[in-house]
Image: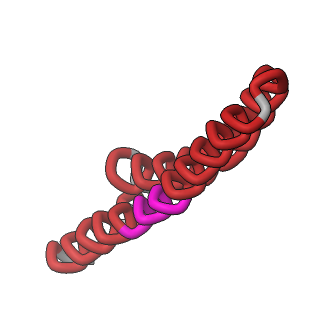
Amino acid sequence: MNLSGAAIVVSASAIGAGLSMIAGIGPGIGQGYAAGKGTEMVGKRPRLQSSIIRTMFLGQAVAQTTGIYAMIIALVLMFANPLIRLL
């Protein structure tokens, strides 16, 4: 493969890394919604605060995994690209 092929692989990897980071939008919106509903329920039922907050944090941790996976994919594509070995 020549130099232009290598440039295509590197530029496509950069575009793929950027597109994978779009997956960070979903967890951000979901966690904001969960935090808003959690504070709303604590305001309605203050005596259940510990269980509401615990459940909210568990849901946010599960929602965050999508963003973490997207970040790992972006980092692999940018710094440990397996496609460069094929050149």
Residue 47: x %, y % from top left: 82, 21
Q: Residue at the spot x=70%, y=32% of the render?
A: 42
Residue 44: x %, y % from top left: 73, 38
Residue 58: x %, y % from top left: 75, 35
Is residue 22 a member of the stretch shown in magenta? yes
Which image quadrant: the N terminus?
bottom left
Residue 34 or residue 68, whichever sits in front: 34
In the displayed structure, 9 sits above or below 69; it is: below
Q: Residue at the spot x=58%, y=46% of the render?
A: 36
Residue 35 or residue 24, whichever sits in front: 35
Residue 63: x %, y % from top left: 66, 49
What secondary structure do most residues of the magenta stretch adopt? helix
Judged from this view, the residue extending furthest toward the left is 3
Q: How many marks?
A: 0
Query: Going by the image, does 86 lie left or right of 65?
Result: left
User: In the image, which residues are magenta?
Assistant: 19-26
Residue 42 or residue 81, whichever sits in front: 42
Query: Going by the image, does 17 lie left or right of 36?
Result: left
Is residue 24 a member of the stretch shown in magenta? yes
Query: Going by the image, does 43 lie left or right of 87?
Result: right
Q: Residue at the spot x=41%, y=54% of the render?
A: 74
Quarter of the image holding residue 51? top right
